[in-house]
Image (cartoon, helix red, strand yellow):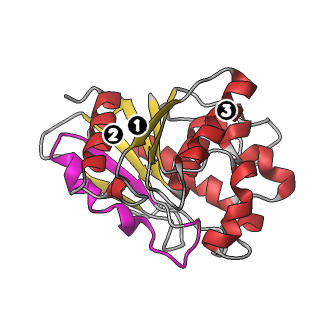
Amino acid sequence: MAYGEAPSQGIDVFLPASPGPHPIAVLIHGGCWSNTTAGREQMRHLGPELTRRGIAVWSIGYRRANEAGGGYPGTYQDVSAALDRLVEDAEAHHLDLSRVVLVGHSAGGHLALWAASRVSLPGESPLRAASRLESRTVISLGGVGDLATFARFVPLLCGPGVLERLAPSDKLTEVSPAALAPAGSVVMVSGVLDRLVPPWVAYDYARALRAKSGIAPRLINLPDAGHFDLVTPSTPAWKEVRDLIETALKAR
């Protein structure tokens, strides 16, 4: 379904065969915040993986940093709009808004952490809005929580211009999850063999969050797992991730 005019402003919805009400996994795709990589189709293979286990999937797209209207503030406003749409459509799809987990991979991990922390934005921020959705847990899969420490790598991994549009230097405290305080619990999952977003990235976020707000995220390092193993159903890493999702939702 569409929530805006741009092709990337869409949501893929996967529903279990059972009548519900269903717990919900909100998936946020990665891809370097750039439209040069695939969008929410990156996560479509996870829809059947979770619906077979009784979990509804709300997989959101968003305008990337190098798309018209994307970057700051559009990318973040898109994430908020897609989450608001979940609240609006929950009854029609028999979704249980008391059981929601946010799951983001890579760049989507950053956006999932941000979405879970947007309630702490300053009132004057254009990104601040009343949060209509509460999630028990946010699970970041090879995601970036501290944009300040990771900033030097973004041009190398994602190309020029992405960081400047996504996180202008004077807006960093509004868009870096490490500068905000999350609502609910945080789980940072890293692959030990991840060369794109190594485990130290999660540790940087955890250190910054503890210093700012005293919150200690759960850090999980999965052996023999690379960046994409975390979202590949045939891998042991995905089975670990799936268990974390089920545990967060108490779906078993």
Crowding near pointer 2: few (<14 within 10 Å), some, many (20+)?
many
Quadrant occupied by the C terminus: top left
- The reply to whether the C-beta atoms of the residues labelled 1 and 3 are less than 8 Å apart is no
Numbered disc 2: secondary structure? strand
Q: Which residue is mark 3?
A: 207
- The alpha-carbon separation of the residues under discs 1 and 3 comes to 23 Å
Quadrant occupied by the N terminus: bottom left
Please check the rendered image and state whether residue 182 is part of the magenta-colored stretch, yes or no.
no
Q: Which mark is residue 101?
A: 1
Q: Amino acid at mark 2?
A: Ile
Stretch in magenta = 32-60
Q: Amino acid at mark 3?
A: Arg
Q: Earlier in the sequence, mark 2 or mark 1?
A: 2
Q: Nearer the viewer, mark 2 or mark 1?
A: 1
Given residues 59 and 9, the one toward you in this image is 59
Numbered disc 3: secondary structure? helix
Q: Which residue corresponds to the image point at 66% horizontal and 76% vertical from the top-left?
A: 159
Location of residue 216 with respect to 67 vertically, above or below? above
- The reply to whether the C-beta atoms of the residues labelled 2 and 1 are less than 8 Å apart is yes
Q: Which residue is mark 2?
A: 24
Q: Earlier in the sequence, mark 3 or mark 2?
A: 2
